[in-house]
Amino acid sequence: MEHQENPSIEAKQGFFQSTTAKMIMVGFLTLVLLIPLFFVQDLIQERSMRQKEVTEEVSTLWGKEINFYGPMLRIPYKTYKETTIIDAKTKTTSIQKNISLEYAYFFPEKLNNNSEIKKDTSLKRGIYDNIVFTANMKFDGNFGKPNFDKLNIKEEDVVWEKATIVVKTTNLKSIKSDLKINLNNSSLSFEAKPDEDNYYGTLETSNFDYKTMQKSDKIDFKFNMQYNGSKSIEFIPIGKTTSVSINSDWESPSFFGSFAANNTTKKIDKKGFHADWKVLDINRSFSQQYAGKIPNLNEYSFGAKLIKTVDEYQQNERASKYGFLVIGLTFLIFFLIQSISKINIHIFQYSMIGLALIMFYTLLISITEHSSFSLAYAIAGISVVSLITLYSVSILKNKKFPMFIGISLSVLYTFIFVIIQLEDYALLVGSIGLFLILAAVMYFSRKIDWGK
């Protein structure tokens, strides 16, 4: 009796050995490998959040952002409130006049500031660097004669002998100098005062007699302040003419706010930066004097942020977003080699190659935290490309195809590194690169018989 093959078994074996079945399995494996890739992306975000937490903790201890406006001349004035009182027995009516004090604020005619900002590298928490600095700020200028007529206040109601100088600033606890202000030939000390403002702290001098202090209708002032700060420094231009000059050894500033730095004097290089601002009263829409309360003037602030131009965690996150592309193209290269050379590659071997590609990103983030992103990328890339190339030698049983795979992966990782470094041209270069990759795949796959 002749032995007959079972046609259903042959058909089943034929399907699983077909190109279509292999494409389905490789495609499914690619989707499965997205799961560990997502875990790697979560790890990068977690490490990035940890860095922000440590940075915020250090900034709280050292000193936060500096926002400064002042000095302001504060002079009290009398206000009157009349109350009608009726005597219950005599039914006579009398008017009682109550006197209370309100305050008028006057901004300087001229306000000059020169600030020296020096980065501090001594404060480091674990593996994280922090953007902290010391600021030495020098102020000078003058106050003109207060114009109470614009505030509809009679001069006989002004309490000239209780004038004070007021400064509002953030970060009172990080001030590292004795605070004294020279008014003409007199010296007054600042003291911290309670304030309803939750953002600014208030410094105020003791009382002085304005009319005794003034000479030729103006008061000259001069004072210095030293801060520990972090991330940024900004000013509000309350002077009728405000001039600000900042010198720093920080090489990567970002200028921000309502007023741009002077382009003719602005200078940025590896040694630091220099920037100047000059703001006139006609450049901003607030008055030089206020009665009762000063409005919120934060929208008129300007200054400089000290930033890191290269955020290693952001670069790692961008690199991980190309993980699907790397896995897909690598599997496609192996699949094309398998289809052209008729060498059988097991799905387990595809899995090992995929996991090696995922390991690239864990190596990248772990090495970056202890070195630069470029060095970490080179070490992780060389390690993974070498591992897959050597593994391919045992799979493909020759050296020609593994060499091709090693070169292709090296080109692919180099291409992704270039895209990550680019900012303005990243989309253009990426689109051209993907077009060339598609053209190469179409070229090498043109002779494969997809009907088998």
Image (spheres, rainbow, N blue to C red):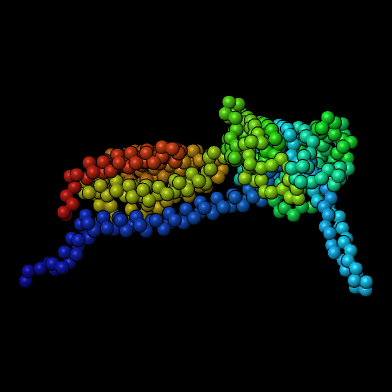
Query: Can see residue 248?
Result: no
User: Looking at the picture, how far across and down is residue 65, in whole percent?
Assistant: 67, 44
**Residue situated in front as seen by the camera: 204 or 89:** 89
**Residue situated in front as seen by the camera: 329 or 147:** 147
Q: Residue furthest top?
A: 264
Q: Residue furthest left?
A: 1
The residue at the point 27 percent across, 58 percent down is 24
Q: Is residue 59 left or right of residue 423?
A: right
Query: Can see residue 154?
Result: yes
Q: Is residue 249 above or below residue 420?
A: above
Q: Quadrant of the C terminus?
A: bottom left
**Residue situated in front as seen by the camera: 355 or 441:** 441
Q: Quadrant of the N terminus?
A: bottom left
Q: Is residue 48 left or right of residue 229?
A: left
Q: Is residue 20 left or right of residue 130?
A: left
User: Looking at the picture, how far across and down is residue 156, in whole percent?
Assistant: 86, 44
The residue at the point 63 percent across, 32 percent down is 277
The residue at the point 40 percent across, 47 percent down is 322
Q: Is residue 385 above or below residue 37?
A: above
Task: Name the image quarter holding residue 175.
Answer: top right
**Residue situated in front as seen by the camera: 380 or 80:** 80
Q: Residue furthest bottom?
A: 89
Q: Residue furthest right?
A: 90
Q: How many marks?
A: 0
The residue at the point 55 percent across, 50 percent down is 48
User: Looking at the picture, how far across and down is residue 280, in whole percent?
Assistant: 65, 34
Q: Is residue 69 left or right of residue 34?
A: right
